[in-house]
Image (spheres, rainbow, N blue to C red):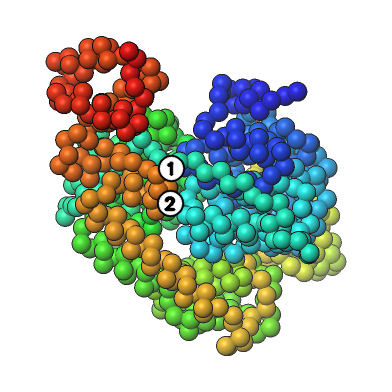
Amino acid sequence: MTEPLDILREYWGYESFRPSQEEIIMESLSGHDVLAILPTGGGKSICFQIPAMMKEGIAVVVTPLISLMRDQVENLERRGIKALCIHMGMSRREVELALNNAIYGDFKFLYVSPERFCQTHFAACLREMNVNFLVVDEAHCVSQWGYDFRPEYLRIGQLRSSLTDVPVIALTATATPAVADDIMDKLSPFIVGTDRRANAFKLIKRSFERPNLTYMVRKADDKIGGILNICQSLPLGSGIVYAGTRKATENLAALLSSSGVSASYYHAGLTPFERMSRQKKWQKGEIRVMACTNAFGMGIDKPDVRFVAHYDVPSSPEAYFQEAGRAGRDGKHSWAVLLWNENDLSRLSQIQTQSYPSIEYMEKIYQDIHIMYGIPYDEGEGRTLKFSLKDFCAKFHLSQSMAFYAIQYISRQGHWSYVEDVDIQTRVRILYTREMLYGGTDGPQPEEGPETALLEYLMRHYPGIFSSFMSVDEGELAQAAGTGIPAMRQTLYSLSVKHIIGYIPQDNSSVILLYHNRLHEKNLSLNPSLYANLKKTSNARMQAMAEYIAEDDTCRSRFLLNYFGQSDSRDCLDCDICRSSGIPDRAVRKLVRDYVASKDGEYSLEEMKAVFNSPERKIPGNWLAVLRDMIDSEDVPPYRQ
């Protein structure tokens, strides 16, 4: 019988599992629902990929990021594992082909965006698939108390009533105890006549402790100089510098480059090609330091990140912990450095105000978006709107940040989906009737060759193309026209100039998907009581972040671990608080602990004396007293007699 370790060796080339991975895999294979809370870099993908490989059928994986989805599929395919993905940027034909392959093919993984679960057709297809596991990545998005709640994730729990025999594997790197409970409740199947948790979840929570990661908080009036100092004082390995605005990332990259540091910047305002190119160069080591917004880093498994620095203070411990955790994934000593000054406290307060605009403001945003697209009352259901936040705010003279948060909350309430950075397929509509195309008019006619070949293909393969714009597959069109894609695009453009077709080239944009017809004023349900509770929770997160940077007594690592419910942690002995605590034994205790761990607990006093009393080590002479105290408190095992 094939064992999980056999699959790990054959497809991934590893000889052993990381902590908690095998436990999660075995619980999943036994049929239990599992919520796995693993720190960033803890190897979450392995936890669902191996169980899915060991059972017949296909695993459906829900993940919110299209770029991460594509990376996962490409990685599996490179290992010889058949995988598919479906997201909002695909044409209708591509979606239908992927669904058919998922139902009738021998694929092992289907990655989907959470918005797909809101569509009736997908739910029907899901019931036709032989689903072996339902995987929920970034599972904190399920909880309305999570820092990144997505209302589309709630549809996953609703569909479980028809997938009661399919185990769920939910994974996240950031969940407080309250959020973890909410995740398990929302994803448990509701079956009439039974308790909500018909199949109780197994919660597997690995320690968030990162002993190789040193947390540092520095008050700095000159933050730019502070970032430059970090980059120059840590010359080995790569680094990430997080900033709160696009402009700040550009300025930081320019300054670092002019000072001799190999650096670039990354934010959502770049084209998809620019983002991909810069990310690959950084991963290959061609760029050492990436100055970026929080759009960068999710799903990136680069082992040699020696430091993560924060130029601006994040708005929550969850965001900070996840971003800082991208350092030191190879287990080597790394640094998480946060710079702050008094302006950061004012900025956090301002962010809180902008993040929660008034109910009346959000009602106005809802109506303005429909007005912008000319959508009358009682119409619009199912429409996908190509949306530019910048253009929208310019038209209605609005603050971009407040409008963004209003759009997000309206999305939380299930009125629409707002998805950033979507690849929008080329769309075509034939403006002529069939009679006009075949000589029944004196107007412009298509030329024999690629133009007529394209039109024939469009008419045969895209029913309805005479009455509405249809998303088309550029590769198929190029093949039908007997040309390459650039030449095919030129042919489409030529046909559009002749007014034979309407042509909307492919693009990358944000989109809003309308779930229902436009509502009249005062009919928009925004749940004010929930909104007030969310605002209160968000404010508590912001206050926790302010307390973290102002802390001058509690170990940084212990502070963060306590926030995530890990109360049995101990001082790291290496952060700025521990180093400046005034207790000289702290550093010695760390040296003792590290030495004993390096010997797997099997050490002798004579061997230790030879090491600790050597002139090269310069260890304080009280180390023996510290060792005896640690043995008495069972912090380390006794030495061999």
Residue 568 x, y percent position in the rendering: 39, 44
Residue 90 x, y percent position in the rendering: 67, 53
Q: Residue at x 47, y 50 (%)?
A: 174
What is the secondary structure assignment of the residue under circle 2? loop
Work out how far the residue at label 1 is from the one at label 2, CA to CA, in angstroms.
Answer: 8 Å
Residue 274: tell me if it is visible: no
What is the secondary structure assignment of the residue under circle 1? loop
Crowdedness near tag 2: few (<14), some (14–19) or many (≥20) residues, C-alpha within 10 Å: many
Residue 535 x, y percent position in the rendering: 43, 71
The residue under label 1 is 208
Q: In which quadrant is the N terminus drawn?
A: top right
Q: Residues at badges 1 and 2 in contact (C-beta under 8 Å)?
A: yes
Which of the two discs, 1 and 2, labels the residue nearer the N terminus? 1
446 sits left or right of 323 in the view: right
Q: Residue at x 70, y 33 (%)?
A: 53
Three-letter amino acid code at the position of disc 1: Phe
438 sits left or right of 548 in the view: right
Quarter of the image where one finds residue 235: top left
The residue under label 2 is 564
Q: Nearer the viewer, residue 485 or 378?
A: 378
Residue 71 x, y percent position in the rendering: 57, 40
